[in-house]
Image (cartoon, grey):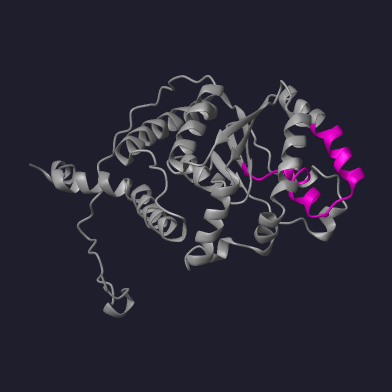
Amino acid sequence: MDQGQRAGTFDIEAIRREVADDFDEELEMEMEEERLERLADAVGDGPRAPQMDRRRYFRELFRLQHELVRLQDWVQAQKLRVVVIFEGRDSAGKGGAIKRITQRLNPRVCRVAALPAPSERERTQWYFQRYVTHLPAGGEIVLFDRSWYNRAGVERVMGFCTPDEVEEFFRSVPEFERMLVRSGIIVLKYWFSITDEEQELRFTMRIHDPLKQWKLSPMDVQSRRLWEDYTKAKEVMLARTHIPEAPWWVVEAVDKKKARLNCIAHLLSQIPYGAVAHPTVQLPERERHDDYARQPVPPEMFVPSLF
């Protein structure tokens, strides 16, 4: 066997380790959620309702993520432009769903837009202006982790805008989204819905979990007090911005696993896609030069092997 053949021969265990490592990120996140479930039982009134079976969850998640890769290829090949909006109360699980969608995708094709509070300059601009710069070009998917609907929710409830500005938003947003759709952009809007009790439990867990306390902002604490105000604002928002060109879709999100699977499955159903032919990839023969010798790395440059 020559050197080229030896270079292409791999131990089956090495291949298994490589495949297993590819799933470790999801497994690590799942282990973190198991820890949170135990914490939920500790801070709650008793054991929670059983969540979706883990084995089935993983099987369905990996299947759907494979389909997301196929969708990504189709979007890229057809130069489609896709906008997916994720809205919901604090701790509703939007971020977890977005992580599972983007986990296997190319960040150059599928990216997340999570805008901070507007700057002083941005507050003087047309309201939609700072969001427009994040809209996709051909062959791109943009996931908005909160969006222009901030005006209908947190800005309205917390008094960061005037009633006139809210009313102008409701007049403008249907036309804005129709304009996006007419220009060829696919717009999908998801509202992640949780119960009053579930949000209280998730906030309590953040208070007691040192790894999650950073997620609980002063604004989150206020949103807890103003649950009913946020509910009224949500109801008005859904009623006034649910249009045929860009309808709202509500995801029941008390069970996080089911919410992720249902959201991904629905997203896939909204964009017809097919198989994209890819050219066969073949590794070229590696060049080798007799006059080259790999130089040793000085020991002091290595990261200490603590594990």
Image: 42 above or below 66: below
**Position of residue 281 in the picture relative to residue 184 (left or right):** left
Q: Quadrant of the C terminus?
A: bottom left
Q: Residue at x 65, y 58 (%)?
A: 220
Q: Residue at x 54, y 65 (%)?
A: 207
Q: Residue at x 41, y 31 (%)?
A: 64
As for residue 163 lying within the magenta part, the answer is: yes
**Residue situated in front as seen by the camera: 106 or 57:** 57
Tell me the quarter of the picture where residue 189 sits: top right
Image: 52 above or below 80: below
**Position of residue 268 in the picture relative to residue 170 (left or right):** left
**Residue situated in front as seen by the camera: 61 or 297:** 61
**Residue situated in front as seen by the camera: 18 or 190:** 190
**Residue situated in front as seen by the camera: 207 or 285:** 207
Estimate the x, y position of residue 164 in percent, counting from the top left: 92, 43
Residue that sits furthest to the bottom in the current view? 300
Tell me the quarter of the picture where residue 141 sits: top right
**Position of residue 85 in the picture relative to residue 59 (left or right):** right
Residue that sits furthest to the front in the current view? 45
Estimate the x, y position of residue 230 in percent, counting from the top left: 72, 46
- The overriding secondary structure of the stretch rendered in magenta is helix
Image: 79 above or below 196: above
Q: Quadrant of the N terminus?
A: top left
Estimate the x, y position of residue 22 in percent, counting from the top left: 32, 46
Q: Residue at x 84, y 39 (%)?
A: 169
Question: Which region is colored magenta?
Answer: 144-173
Residue 132 visible, this angle: no
As for residue 105 lying within the magenta part, the answer is: no
Residue 165 visible, this angle: yes
Estimate the x, y position of residue 206 in percent, counting from the top left: 52, 61
